[in-house]
Amino acid sequence: MLTAAMGCGGATQAPTSAGESPDEQPATLAMPTATATVAEAPPDDPPTEDPPKQPIAISGDGGWMMFHGDAARTGNVDVPVITRPRVAWNAKVGIQSWLNSPLVVGDLVIVPTCGDKHNAGDPKDGVYFLNSNDGVAKGFVKLPNDANGAAATRERVFVGSDDGKFYAIDIKTQKIVWEYQASGKVYTHPLLIGDRVVAGDAGGNLFALDQASGTKSWVVTLRGAIRGGAASDGTRIYAASQEGDVIAVDLRGKKIWRKTVTRPAWSGKGNDPIKVYSTPIVHGRHLLVPFARDTYFSGKPAIVAIDRSTGQVRWHAKDTKAGKKDDWGNVRVTPAVAKGLLVYPEPYSGDVIGIDAKSGRSKFRHTVGECLFPSWSSPAAAGDMVYTPRFDGRVYAVDAASGKVQWQVYLGEKSRVKVESVPAKYSGTNRCDWDVSSGSPIYSPAALDSAGNLYVGTGEGYIYRISK
């Protein structure tokens, strides 16, 4: 069993004071001892050199080339839906955290990982290249510390790291071709737009680099660390920070608007800045921003809509349940947009959520599994079907129209992986925990390829492909 943690990218808030719900607890996450074996040569043996790397060639088109599948960060692609799931293969690549979204480029799966231990350098930190058909490793590029968010073209992978650098890796040769020294850890999911790659760092710097050379095109500094990354509508780039600083710039980095976005304080007196861990979502006229705060709030889901033209707040999400309102926690995932709804796993619960993307009004909230405080995994959608990984180690296929689970697969422990029957109603206890009762949590985002195959990584250190 693994200790609850956020994975790569540093610790989060400490528990709040008595009488309030605690936020996600910082901890060190390590691979389970049964699987975290690293062979070492006897002391008298001479050091061995790595074997020469075989060139990687990519076949096929399309894929999931950056987090959430597109620059708008909708998380929704037009691919076939999985109706009868099967686990096609698994591959051991190391811990995959909330920033370690798998990427798919043609027949190549690219996985940034935290190796054997997060928040510390180890020999498994870096980027893995796998054959999408069978999961067989085609290459690996080691980084000095945990890998975080990544994006890819057919030629290169762009990835940030806890070592404070942003790297470009040549896919064919598996060599680092340039690196950029940032101001602190580089957490974010990179954004590909034109011939630039845009990322952010712990110093609050949003920077655009030339994909070919790594030359800096522009930089804009926000208040607070940039955790999730940027989104774009093709003409503007949007980003938000941990101190509620939200900005829109044009493709040259020129400011269009900049706002400090707030939410009501827990005390009821005044407002506090929102804390943004996820990427914003471009949807219609709005920029949709999930956020964290000091604790849970009754009747107030943690999502705000901002007018993309002016930066003005248009709505804060509302619980439309009649009578006593539900409690709503900190949203660090990026919801998927499906059927006009924002669909995601709600923290501090065992629930999946659907919120109207135009009005912010809750449309469904269904309990699907055990109540757990943490929720880190961002879903991926194929049309109206939203594949929703939860901290409990399962992936739930949720119909966006009804909010009902169509199937579920347990991935939390390799020896117990299985397609499970979906209960008519979840019948667990009301107790909420920080850790899973057995096995390993899921932290990482889901990804899809052009054929509709689903890729999900786990805290145990395996990535799985789920197919029809």
Image: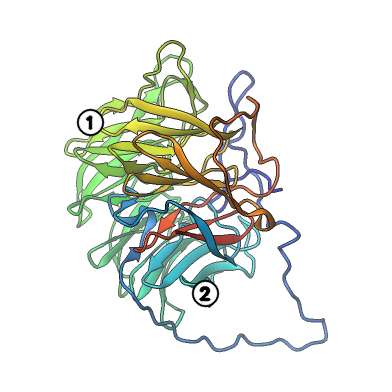
Its colouring scheme is rainbow
Which numbered marker is on residue 312? 1
Question: Which marked residue is nearer to the observer: mark 1 or mark 2?
Answer: 2
Q: Above or below — where is 40 with respect to 46? A: above
In the drawing, what numbered circle is on residue 19? Answer: none
What distance separates the C-alpha of mark 1 from that of mark 2?
Answer: 43 Å
Q: Secondary structure at mark 1?
A: loop
Residue at 47%, 30% in the rendered image: 366
Sequence-earlier tag: 1 or 2: 2
Residue 252 screen position, x and y as percent: 20, 57
Image position of 174 with respect to 424: above or below = below
Q: Quadrant of residue 180?
A: bottom left
Residue 99 percent coordinates (x, y) = 48, 53
> Viewed as shown, does residue 321 lie left or right of 210?
right
Q: Which residue is disc 2 drawn over? A: 141
- Using the image as rendered, state which of residue 283 and residue 80 is in the foreground: 80
